[in-house]
Image (cartoon, grey):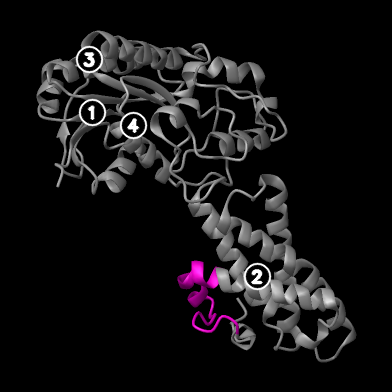
Amino acid sequence: MSRRRTVAVTGSAGTIGRVVRERLADRYDLRLLTHRPAPFPSVAVELGDLDALTAAFDGADAVVHLAGASHVEDPWNDILAANVVGVRNVLEASRLSAVEKVVIASSNHAVGGLEAEFAPSIYDPQTARVIGDDAPLRPDSLYGASKAFGEILGRIYAEQHGVRVVCLRIGTVRADDDPNPTDVSETAGWLDLTDDQRRQRLRATWLSQRDCAGLIAAAIDADVRWAVAFGVSDNPRRFFGAGSAAAYLGDMPSACKLWGRAVAESRAQGAITLLAYALSMLAPGEIWNRRIASARAHASEGLRLARETGLENCACYHLAVLASAAALPLVNACAGAAARSSTPGPSAASSDADRDAIALLDRIGNDLLQLYPEQATSLGLDVDTPDDLASLGEADDR
């Protein structure tokens, strides 16, 4: 059995540091370093203290460097101390401690001037423009310049001192892991964008916490001397290219595409809710009418999402859209029949098209029930007998 590698992590109290702590602790022996004492086992080390860093890295196989000034608006003195002197000390301490691999948290701001030139059209889903990781350095700020410096210095240490270095231009990692927040007014403040444009940008630059951990692990494990790679999930309008990430580190880990697995699962859960509504046609009167209205709303939302993002690359998300697409004509037909009938129910769907829609929903429902049994159980669906439409009709009016 191979020895677990020891990985020192600077900035382990931050958002990405928490991702590493929670998602990579079972893969590596983590040595957590912080700027100040933290409420978890760690060692407080200043980036300006080369001797302390060297001692902290002693015996480590790899260093993941996350600490530093992290905002475009940070004052120059903070950027200089943390991102210029700090990254030099991390690399030098790694050399002195014979660390094999250093993974540096860089930023897309190292080439942010290119984004600024083409914004906001570059966020348009119909635009094919991509900023590749081979694009020339073009910082958009002093912060971006400091990240470009870290990449350049990393290459010097790789080529002249034998320290393997991977620089990850990490995209938007959110503490709530949500690529579609209600309030986007505080995002991308350095660009003159409307809220809709900010939302489009966020969807393009989002890096899910799961993908972030997977990318950092891939960088630690990669057999490369030096590389720069963008860190963004496989989003519907990803304008930062994935060239080096794919060439050097392998494909971005992602069980589902687009906005990431968490969002895909939430949409699939919505599709299960849709099935419960669309197929529970045994209750008469006002309950029936509310269920029809809810089913129509779920179906319309599913189709809207399908048009916005395209779902052919993600199996579970695709199931959700198929369910919506099948249910929309069904609930419309049933709603019309219900208006003409005093006894609404399954018999209201009498046309061949409606029966085909019911059959499709039934088949998709079987798949969803198997993929998401916990959500199905919470909705009152019968996981053991998914073909029994009567069990679906017993779901509560939720």
Local secondary structure at mark 1? strand
Name the kind of residue labelled 3 in the image: Gly
Image height check: is 173 above or below 110?
below
> In 3D space, how far apart are the residues under numbered discs 4 and 1 (Cα atoms)?
11 Å
Mark 4 and mark 3 in contact (Cβ < 8 Å)?
no
- Residue 81 included in the magenta stretch of the image: no
Indicate left or right for 310 with 381 as reference. Answer: right
Query: Which dot marks residue 274?
Result: 2
- Residue 385 included in the magenta stretch of the image: yes
Residue 196 visible:
yes
> In 3D space, how far apart are the residues under numbered discs 3 and 1 (Cα atoms)?
14 Å
Image height check: is 98 above or below 311?
above
Indicate left or right for 336 with 16 as reference. Answer: right
Q: State which region is magenta.
A: 368-387
| 2 or 4: mark nearer the eye | 4
Name the kind of residue labelled 2 in the image: Leu
> In 3D space, how far apart are the residues under numbered discs 1 and 2 (Cα atoms)?
47 Å
Q: Provide residue 254's location: percent of width, then percent of height.
A: 46, 46
> In 3D space, how far apart are the residues under numbered discs 2 and 3 (Cα atoms)?
57 Å
Q: Provide residue 138's location: percent of width, then percent of height.
A: 52, 11
Q: Identify the residue at image location x=41%, y=20%.
A: 74
From the image, tell me which residue sits under label 4: 219
Q: Provide residue 336's location: percent of width, then percent of height.
A: 87, 77
From the image, tell me which residue sits under label 1: 63
Task: Classify residue 270 by image quadrant.
Answer: bottom right
Indicate left or right for 160 with 237 as reference. Answer: left
Of callouts 2 and 3, the N-terminal one: 3
Q: Quadrant of the C terminus?
A: bottom right
Of callouts 4 and 1, the N-terminal one: 1
